[in-house]
Image (cartoon, rainbow, N blue to C red):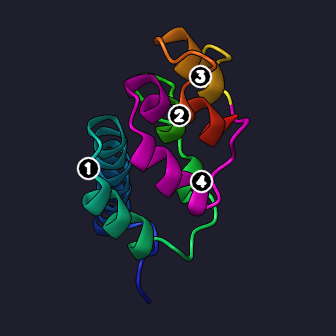
Amino acid sequence: MADTNSPKKEIKHASANAVKINVYDSAHEYAKAGRVEALTELLESHQDDDTFVDHFHTKSGTTWLTSAAAEGQIDIVNLLLESECSIDLPDGKGNTALIQAACHGYDGKSPFLNVIG
């Protein structure tokens, strides 16, 4: 009978978690940098995971949407909204994407705020 608590199983599980964290971190960087095609591919490859699009970046506590809003990445914002991300989900400091956009110089006349507001 096989031992289900073997170190090999623990290593495989840890490796799977490490890969998942790297995917989340990559997606966060794609959102900040405006890499629409790369983020689109990641979203499509995880379309069975309803929570994927709302993942928090582990180091900064931000969501992909709040990061994209802070960087003025309107194409990423549109992509995330089309992917049904949670628009009102705050980052680790309590800021939503709309607050991030406003704090980073996007005034009320900006079409950017109309997209996320």
Quickly name the residue at label 4.
Answer: 81
- The residue under the point 28% across, 67% down is 8
> Contact, CB < 8 Å: mark 3 with mark 1?
no
Q: Earlier in the sequence, mark 4 or mark 1?
A: 1
> Contact, CB < 8 Å: mark 1 with mark 2?
no
Looking at the image, is mark 3 or mark 4 nearer the viewer? Answer: 3
Residue 76: x and y, percent?
A: 42, 48
* Between 66 and 55, the one nearer to me in the picture: 66
Looking at the image, is mark 3 or mark 1 nearer the viewer? Answer: 3
> Contact, CB < 8 Å: mark 4 with mark 2?
no
Which amino acid, mark 4?
Leu
Quickly name the residue at label 1.
Answer: 35
Looking at the image, is mark 1 or mark 2 nearer the viewer? Answer: 2
Question: Magenta residues, as a range?
Answer: 67-89
Query: Where on the picture, by quarter, is residue 32?
Result: top left
Eyeballing the image, is 111 above or below 11? Answer: above
What whole-number distance in Å separates the C-alpha atoms at marks 3 and 4? 20 Å
Residue 111: x and y, percent?
A: 55, 35
What whole-number distance in Å separates the C-alpha atoms at marks 3 and 1? 25 Å
* Between 60 and 65, the one nearer to me in the picture: 65
Quickly name the residue at label 2.
Answer: 112
Quickly name the residue at label 3.
Answer: 109
Query: Where on the picture, by quarter, is residue 41?
Result: bottom left
What whole-number distance in Å separates the C-alpha atoms at marks 1 and 2? 17 Å
Instruction: Please indicate, yes or no, whether residue 96 appears anywhere in the rendered image.
Output: no
Report the quarter where the C terminus lies: top right
* Between 111 and 15, the one nearer to me in the picture: 111
Report the quarter where the N terminus lies: bottom left
